[in-house]
Image (spheres, rainbow, N blue to C red):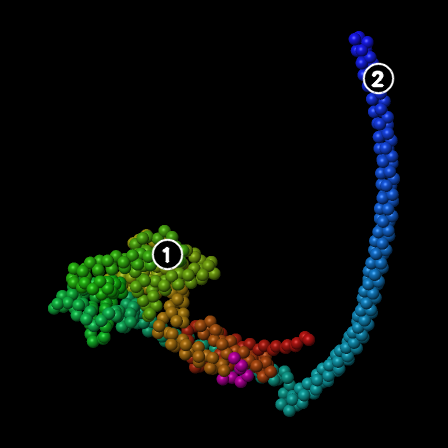
Amino acid sequence: MVMGIVGLIIGLVAGVIAGYFVRRAVASRQVASAEAQAQALVSEARREAEAVKREALVEAKDEALKLRTEAEEELKQRAAEVARKEERLDQRETMLDNRVSSLDRKERAIEEREQELQRRREEVERHEQRARAELERVAGMTAADAKHMLIEDIQEEAKRDAMVLVRDVEAQAREEADRRARKILTGVMQRVASELTTESTVTTLTLPNEDMKGRIIGREGRNIRAFEAATGTNLIIDDTPEAVVLSCFDPIRREMARLTLERLIADGRIQPARIEEMYARAKEEVEREIREGGEWAVLEVGITNMHPELVRVLGRLKFRTSYGQNVLKHVVEAAHIAGMIAEELGADVAVAKRATLLHDIGKAVTHEVEGSHALIGAEIARRLKEKPEVVHGIEAHHNEVEPRTVEAAIVQIADAVSGARPGARRETLETYVKRLERLEQIAMEFEGVDKVYAMQAGREVRIMVKPDVVDDLKAEVIARDVAKKVEEELQYPGQIKIMVIRELRASATAK
């Protein structure tokens, strides 16, 4: 039994040993086979690498050949371009040489012309000398004698002008005798500054229909009587179709009546109680407009710290007119003018503007107080604590008081300038237009005049003359002759400047 087991073990061991050697032999054969395969793969890879290398070399040679061909083609093109540019430069150089030669020829020609002109100028001077000598021989006098005669003529003309001035002074002296009478009349006209005409003392209202007239009159006239009693105006109802007229010398009362009647017509209920109610509202509205008008004026002129009552009195001027000119706008305009004049003269600008703004406040109450509006306005300003120099400017602007300061004189000037400027007052407009037309007609009557323009509201006339007909000396003669004719034929305030312009223009076209 034991022997059997031992034999079995020995057999197993021998089998294991034999298997080991067998597996080893198989593994050796596999390793050899793998090495052979690896060597084959390496050899194949080397052959493929050589093939790729040869292909890359061929491609690189082809690319290099292509680049070289392109570079040579580009060099050829650039060389051709350079050749063309050199050819153009040669052509330009040739053209410049030709132009230089042409300019040299022209320069020589100009020099020759200048020499010819100089020769002719000298010849003309010789002819002028001979002509002057011949003229002296024929006239029997020398150039000095002719000059002396011309001076005598000018002196005689100056004497005539002086005589005209003396005559004007004498006329002014004769008129001085009537000055006081005119002053009285002027004071009356200033107190009643609004024109006594239909346009400034009456107001026309349009009615929606004719039936409204009966409603305004009321039963037995009670509505119209109540209206006139409440407003203090006359209501005129006549045959004028669809219209009634309000008449009153006081523009403020007339404005209140107008607003009242307009509201009554719009409301349709016209009766005494309603009239009084509407009149109260219209009165409030007019008072508000008066305050706003005064505040606008002081702000427009740039004046501060003015008494509220003065502002209110100033606002009343919004409803006053003087020869068609609104008095509130007049004082504002005059204040601006006074400020500019005072600044130029170095005077007190604030005093000049303040006195000018207030110089006509007396017109706001002249229907209520007796006296000149200048003195009334000065008294109002004095009572409301205005400075003495401002009060003096107000009272002296129409010479009721002799002006003692520069600012008072400036107030007079600004008032006159604002009132006398063309178009400011209705009565001067038509005369102003006719005067400008006649100014231009007078200047156009002279020989050689091309165009005439009346400038600066007729204070300057510009005359354009034909330069080939009128020389410089004749232009001066035309200016003097036009001035004389204007003095003889026209009536105008101040002075008119006559300016003769002789302009010679030369033009050429560059091609």
Which residue is the extreme one toward the bottom?
138
Alpha carbon separation for disc pair 2 and 1: 143 Å
Instruction: Give the image location of residue 484, x and y in percent.
Output: 48, 80
Please, what is the three-letter code of the amino acid marked with disc 2? Answer: Ala
Q: Is residue 400 above or below residue 500?
A: above
Q: Is residue 448 magenta?
A: yes
> Residue 511: where, in percent of width, then height?
68, 75
- Where disc 1 sits, the SS reads helix
Q: Residue furthest top?
A: 2
**Residue span colored magenta:** 445-451
**Residue denoted by label 1:** 298
448 vs 37, left or right, is left
Mark nearer the viewer, 2 or 1: 2
Q: Is residue 245 visible?
A: no
Left or right: 108 as drawn, with respect to 201: right
Q: Is residue 499 magenta?
A: no
Front one among 214 and 154: 214
| Residue under label 2 | 14
From this viewpoint, which residue is outermost toward the front? 1
